[in-house]
Image: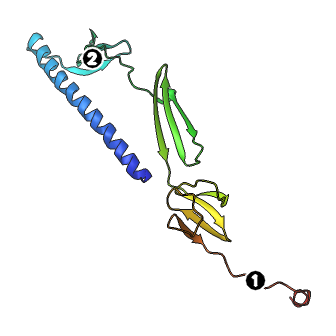
Amino acid sequence: MSLQKAFDEGFEAVKSYIDKTFSSFEDRMEAMQQKLQQLGDKADPVNVASALIDREGNLVLTFSNGEIKSLGIVVGRDGETIKGADGLGFDDLSEELADDGRTIIRRYMRGDEVKEFRHTFPVVLDRGVYKAEQEYTAGDGVTWAGSFWIAQKDTSEKPGVDDGWRLAVKSGRAGRDLTESKAARA
């Protein structure tokens, strides 16, 4: 999978989650706004300017007149308290390069909560001279019989035997040896 495709799929998944969450939130905000207008002064309506769930899980409203009001703990559909700090951020982030040399492991950790994402990049890595007993991964490059080969799939076969390898750089012709008399003329 290409890096762009992986990014696009991840972006769409996050966007879908946020859209779904905010759709429900916006419906609740609209219902609350209507209720507040029914209860408030009809001549001077007060609008909800913003709402947030603080770190303790309280719903806090800011009104168009500047007033702030905490409505108490928010309880989710499953009966569990929703905390304002339910996401993991950059302060909770660590990254490392995996042993394969082409995968970045990104971990978000806070307490017992850990979320891990692996991002593999389609790059060619020079693994040196081909070794018969070694497993190679798609994208590994090796030198064999004077040529450079790139693995097209995971393989342990020798380059040139099957379709597991693609010839990237072909060995050149052998040159003639330079003799002393030719070197003197040059």
Residue 12: x and y in percent read 31, 43
Residue to which mark 1 is pinned: 175
Residue positioned 25% across, 13% down in the render: 79
Q: How many residues crowd around disc 2 within 10 Å: few (fewer than 14), some, or many (20 or more)?
A: some
Q: What element carries label 1?
A: loop
Looking at the image, which residue is at 22% across and 25% down? 25
Residue 110 vs 19, above or below: the answer is above
**Would you say residue 120 is visible in this rendering?**
yes
Separation of residues labelled 2 and 1 (CA atoms): 82 Å
Task: Return the mark for residue 160.
Answer: none
Query: In the rendering, at what x and y percent does residue 63 appear?
Result: 24, 17
Q: Earlier in the sequence, mark 2 or mark 1?
A: 2
* Relative to 48, residue 147 above or below: below
The residue shown at (67%, 71%) is 145
Q: Quadrant of the rendered structure where residue 69 is?
A: top left
Give the residue drawn at x 62%, y 75%: 170
Q: Name the residue under label 2.
A: 62
Above or below for 5 versus 111? below
Q: Where is residue 46 in the image (x, y as percent from the top left)?
A: 17, 16
Q: Can you give x and y, in whole percent of width and height, for residue 109 in the image? A: 49, 26
Q: How crowded is mark 1: few (under 14 residues within 10 Å), some or many (20 or more)?
A: few
| Left or right side of 31 for 67 | right
Regarding mark 2 in the picture, which secondary structure is present there? strand
Judge whether residue 44 can be spotted in this image: no
Q: What residue type is labelled 1?
A: Gly
Between residues 25 and 33, which one lies in front from this camera angle? 25
